[in-house]
Image (cartoon, grey):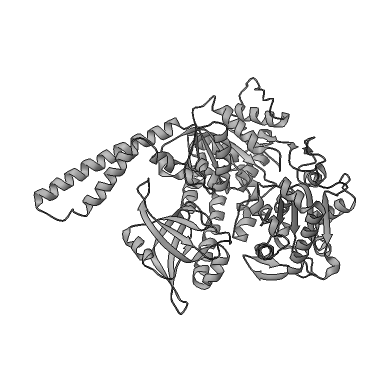
Amino acid sequence: MNEQRTNSPLLHLQRQQLLLRMEYEYEKEEFRRQTEVMGVARKVKRGLAWYPAQAGRSYYNSLNQLVVEITRSEDSDIEHCFEYGRPVVFFRQSADGSISYYNFQGSVSYADDTRMVVVMPGAVAVADVQGADRLGVQLYFDETSYRAMFEALEETLRAKGNRLGELRDILLGNNQKPGFRELYPVRFPWLNSTQETAVNRVLCARDVAIVHGPPGTGKTTTLVEAIYETLHREPQVLVCAQSNMAVDWISEKLVDRGVNVLRIGNPTRVNDKMLSFTYERRFENHPLYPELWSIRKELRQLSGKGRRGSYEERESLRSRMSRLRDRATAIEVQINAELFDSAHVIASTLVSSNHRLLNGRRFGTLFIDEAAQALEAACWIAIRKADRVILAGDHCQLPPTIKCYDAARGGLERTLMEEVVARHPAVVSLLKVQYRMNEAIMRFSSSWFYDGELEAAPEVRHRGILDWDTPITWIDTSEMEFKEEFVGESFGRINKSEADLLLAELEAYINRIGGHRILEERIDFGIISPYKAQVQYLRSKIRSSAALRPYRSLLTVNTVDGFQGQERDVIFISMVRANEEGQIGFLGDLRRMNVAITRARMKLVILGEAETLGHHAFYKKLLEYIERGLCQL
């Protein structure tokens, strides 16, 4: 089977269908189980629900969707999973604690920490939630995303005699080699040599190119340059990523470069700059929009009169409404044509590239950022619209999030980027100079994950906060008899004693640096744990700590996944695992640990029980590396 999968793109895609179906069924069953079994308090704690919630004003947005504002006042410090496009359901909790769900769904148009705008199916649904007491809202199973992925796989499987079929056979097969054009190299004096090579490889690629960006190597800078340069040769490109946050990040960098970006979907970080390039804001700022808005308003008013009056009056009304609808449609078509024709970059998540607004549109080039975090099926949604594809990311960092263990183990976790890297190494450009970390922090990751090919830029090689300080410290808790506790599947494990020690060490390090200096220089700290329960415990302890209160704005506590793409001056990592069996669970996913240990610019402190973690070759080697005084591996 493996041999066939390796050589046959069709068998490979059929395998993807099977594995995606397993994930779909597992997630659907998991949602059903959560809905029926899990209490409201646990859903709120896990960021899956808001309760209590209040329904505020309702209105028609610029896309003529009826929306309602939902706010929460409690537990606003708990990170939630609501974001643009996610489906939701509403519920009421009675006095005896029983839950009743409303029989309609909405979808998130926008969400921040305390407020959410939800697209509703109609006025009756809005009235229901506005009139409800003890109202709650929770995430619903995302059928739409799965449907888009299954459709993309099916279309890619069937493709014959077209560009999609060619790309399928090149990317997933071994017989056809990706092609490159001969172009005179473009010089970019502001890039380093590996970044410059990567941009030129993108420009020369006929079918596919990969920008492999290890931590701190300027992947986004390189990708922005490649997009900017491609736009000198093509009128418009499609830029996608798996998450809304990644789309926001690359879009913002392109806007800073003066590129006209049209963002499909609402950004996760909302400010005027981010909103200014969204489709919705551009639509309502168009000169023709006031006329369209007044027509829509009149149509809504007239629709309530449709059954009254004589036959002639009803016919006259129908005729007027028909003319108004035709005019509204004509205006919409004109606005959309002008918005899309003037945009250089269309930006969206991979799933949102299936949006009706993009129906029938084709692009010379598709750029997929953070491609190593995207399910292969999601990539094919966007690839269907393009003639060539550029993948950027790092398959040695975070993999896609997959809930079904068997599906992940069966190969669903292996991304399209990994597949192409393995089959066509010639299309890969590795960025080798990193601009984030002290060399000692970088070197272990470079040796283990990147064949020792990374080098620290001269300006960061010896960066540090204190004189005579070691860049990496491992605080071994083996003699302290700390023990982990299991607190549930999603939250994993907690080690309160280790967390308390971490905060004591953090206070001591802050005192060594000096509080005044920290505030003056804005020295920032990140606290990472692989487990959500440990993260929440650390957050609660920091909130109640008087000693840490002055520095709270400079402290970030999050999971490894939450720190992807981020960096801090100082990083503390709580490893949590401490048991006699040497079990380390998903700490065995070394790509996550690669993310964790490469977030620090100047100082990395790891707290963990060496006796437990030392059973694994990676942690044994890391301990040896630190104990040897950071000499060469």
Is 528 placed left or right of 625 in the picture? left
Q: Residue at x 21, y 40 (%)?
A: 323
Is 289 placed left or right of 178 in the picture? left
Q: Position of residue 527 (x, y in %)?
A: 71, 56
Q: Residue at x 52, y 43 (%)?
A: 380
Q: Position of residue 479 (x, y in %)?
A: 86, 68
Viewer-closest of 316 and 147: 316
Q: Position of residue 151 (x, y in %)?
A: 46, 48
Viewer-closest of 336 and 168: 336
Q: Position of residue 41 (x, y in %)?
A: 54, 70
Does residue 484 lie above or below 276 as drawn?
A: below
Q: Residue at x 66, y 51 (%)?
A: 563
Q: Is residue 523 visible?
A: no
Viewer-closest of 15 and 338: 338
Q: How many marks?
A: 0
Identity of the residue furthest to the right in this view: 628
Does residue 478 lie above or below 411 as drawn?
A: below
Viewer-closest of 17 and 413: 413
Identity of the residue furthest to the front in this view: 516
Q: Is residue 103 visible?
A: yes
Q: Residue at x 54, y 24 (%)?
A: 233
Identity of the residue furthest to the top in this view: 184
